[in-house]
Amino acid sequence: MQKIEVEFINQSMDRLNLPANTDELARQTLVRIFRELKLSPSSDTEEKQVWMVDQESMSVQMPEHFEQLMTDIALVYSTEDSKSSSIRPKADGVLLHLSAIVRRKKDQLYADSSLPSHHIHAAPYWHFQTTTTGSDDLAFKASVDYVLWYGACGDWDTNLAVVRSSGLLDDECWAALPSMSVVYAARKARKYKGGIYGVCTDSHTWTFLHLSDRGRISRRCLIWDDNKQEIIGQLYKIIGQAFDLHRAREQDPKARERIRDEIFAWNEDKKSSDDKSRVDDGNIAPGGW
């Protein structure tokens, strides 16, 4: 790389406050992503707009059984040695409870609209524990624990990728960026519009990233104990956007057919490999994932 390019990348990552404890291999991966995709930090105005949360999102109340679930998980995994084991059930609980809240809200909002087929009505939907695979221009694989799809995988119709940390974090985490960059590169090659959010969490520290379709990155790091309502609000907003994007995709007959075909194929795969799917939970996405 030319010296000026190296300096620009380093300045960009410094401006974005790349975590100080990022290991050398991870930093090299991020440098490569910035270089090959020509990414840069969002402006202050863009960043403010990305992380703006409306009153509805900030007033979302989690049900009592969710609060009890979080309390029970904390009780079961109360020792220092076992706290990292609480990460998965807590993250699962937050994401799936919020998805249910958003679905009920959107079902009420669209109650008078004509319903799509039952296959299409299944979207948006989550895939768990899968891998994003880049094209020749960005040839690497990145593990991701949750992907929220609002359309067909072949169309890269996702607006959220979540990486669950395997251990407790002492700083923010950028582990979602590689998966986000694969989606960004694939969309750019197809001239598709739309940004993507990424989250890395240990259920206590939540690092939110956003990559716009112009290659602008912004970040927001929140702590559950201090910023619980904003974390819920940000996730509610993002998941809600997936439902609205899905409604828009339904209006495109070809896109609707691709969604139907993929969901039908996944259901057939699950029926024929039921035993395997219990082990490889959610790892059923077709080519490219």
Image: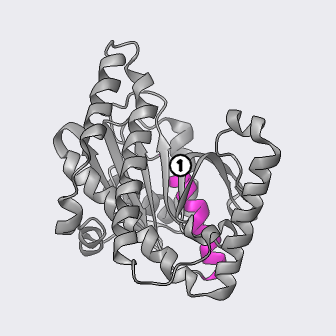
Res 277 → quadrant:
top right
Q: Amino acid at mark 1?
A: Tyr
Element on which disc 1 rests? strand
- Dot 1 corresponds to which residue? 146
Viewer-proximal residue, 49 or 152? Answer: 152
Residue in the image at 56% along x and 80% along y: 249
Asked if residue 186 is among those painted magenta in the image, a careful observer would answer: yes
Q: Residue 59: image x %, image y %? A: 17, 59
Percent x, y for residue 280?
69, 37
Q: Is residue 218 visible?
A: no
Q: Residue at x 44, y 23 (%)?
A: 85
Q: Residue at x 49, y 79 (%)?
A: 247
Is residue 80 rendered to the left or right of residue 192? left
User: Residue 129 lies in what quarter of the image?
Assistant: top right
- For the N terminus, give its image quadrant: bottom right
- From the viewer's side, name the closer residue of 258 and 181: 258
Residue located at (54% from left, 68% from top): 150
In the picture as drawn, the residue positioned furthest to the right comes out as 272
Choose between 188 and 14: the one closer to the eye.
188
Decide: few, some or many residues near mark 1? Use Cα within 10 Å; few <14, some 14-19, many ≥20.
many
Q: How is the image coloured?
A: one colour
Most frequent secondary structure within the magenta stretch: helix
Residue extent of the magenta highlight: 175-191
Q: Is residue 188 left or right of residue 171?
A: right
The quarter of the picture where residue 216 lies is bottom left
The answer, for residue 245, to whether it is visible in the render is: yes
As drawn, 151 above or below 276:
below
